[in-house]
Every structure is written in C-alpha cells, then in structure tokens.
Image (spheres, grey):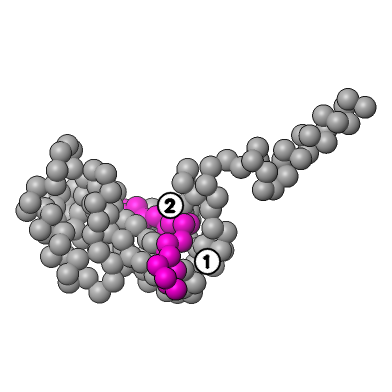
C-alpha cells in the first residue's frame, strides 16, 4: 500500500502543469515549430527563449534570441527578437556610442537599439502571431543590423 501511495505521488509530481515538474520559464512551442519549418538550429535558454547563432559573411557569426514571452499593450501583442551588438566593459555607454546607437535606430526600417545591462541589443518587435516568413525577416533584420554595428564599433571584432 505504501508503494502505491508513493508511486501515485511520484506520478502526480511529474504530471504536466504541476509545480514539481516545471523547470524554469516555459518556451513557446509555436515558435519552435516555426523555427523548425525554417530549418533553423536553436537551443532553448534558461529563460525559455530560443537562441540561435547564424553564420555570416567573412567567417563572422551573429547571436540572436527569439523571446518566448509575449508583450502586450492594449490590444497589441508583440514578440521580441534580440541580437547583441556591443558590450561595455564597465560604467555607462560613452556618449559617442549612445549617439551612434540612436542614429542607427532612427534610420532602421524595423527595430531599434536598447540597453540591456552592459550590452546594446538590437530589438525587433513583431506581431505575436506573425508568420514564419515574417519571423525569418525579423531575425534577418536583427542579425544583420547588430553585426554591422558590432563591426563598426569594435573595429571588426566578432564577439557575438
């Protein structure tokens, strides 16, 4: 009898949706299916976001995240695609760098630069229900814009 009770508790603990079965934030499976359709290789990070590294020209790579979390404002629901372009070693961003990021944001077709801790991230916001093709275009915009500015600000270094 004790074995059956223990087994029942163990099975209940492993059931989907139980507190014991959850390991950190959940990823949005719909994004995973879209990325699979696009044949993109990805990993799911500790935040439940989709992390990818793309090969670019000149043997460069670029890191990008597709956030699982949906942001809402009124009737709008958006998903964010983030790609790092610059890291500050300590303190504040120098004014020349901050102004360069603002200028780049002004000329961008989609997306803009934001500060996230010690990093400048290029963020593209798309409709949460965007198609796979729209997601692919947003990822492309993020990686190309972030890598271009990374090259400029770091004199060609490839950290991301």
Task: Give 60 or 142, whichever is nearer the viewer.
Answer: 142
Query: Which of the two discs, 1 and 2, labels the residue nearer the N terminus?
Result: 1
Residue at image position (93%, 27%) is 1
Q: Which residue is mark 2?
A: 51
Q: Which residue is mark 1?
A: 34
* Residue 22: image location, x then y, percent: 61, 42
Residue at image position (89%, 31%) is 4
Magenta highlight on residue 57: yes
Q: Main secondary structure of the magenta part?
A: strand
Classify mark 2: helix, strand or loop.
strand
Task: Give 54 or 31, whichever is nearer the viewer.
Answer: 31
Residue farthest to the front?
74
Classify mark 1: helix, strand or loop.
helix
Magenta highlight on residue 133: no
Quadrant in the rendering for residue 7: top right
Task: Give 133 or 104, whichever is nearer the viewer.
Answer: 104
Is there a contact, CB below 8 Å, between mark 1 and mark 2? no
* Residue 74: image location, x then y, percent: 42, 70
* Residue 26: image location, x then y, percent: 55, 50
Residue 107 seen? yes
């Amino acid at each position: 009898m004790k074995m059956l009770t223990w087994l029942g508790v163990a099975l209940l603990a492993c059931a989907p949706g139980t507190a014991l079965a959850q390991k950190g934030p959940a990823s949005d499976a719909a994004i995973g299916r879209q990325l699979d359709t696009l044949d993109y290789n990805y990993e799911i990070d500790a935040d439940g976001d989709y992390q990818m590294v793309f090969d670019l020209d000149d043997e460069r790579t670029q890191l990008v995240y597709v956030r699982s979390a949906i942001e809402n404002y009124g009737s709008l629901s958006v998903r964010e695609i983030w790609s790092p372009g610059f890291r500050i070693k300590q303190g504040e961003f120098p004014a020349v760098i901050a102004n360069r990021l603002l200028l780049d944001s002004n000329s961008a077709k989609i997306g803009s630069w934001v500060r996230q801790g010690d990093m400048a991230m290029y963020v593209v916001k798309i409709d949460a229900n965007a198609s796979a093709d729209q997601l692919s275009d947003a990822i492309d915009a993020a990686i190309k814009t972030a890598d271009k500015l990374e090259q400029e600000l770091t004199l060609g270094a490839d950290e991301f």
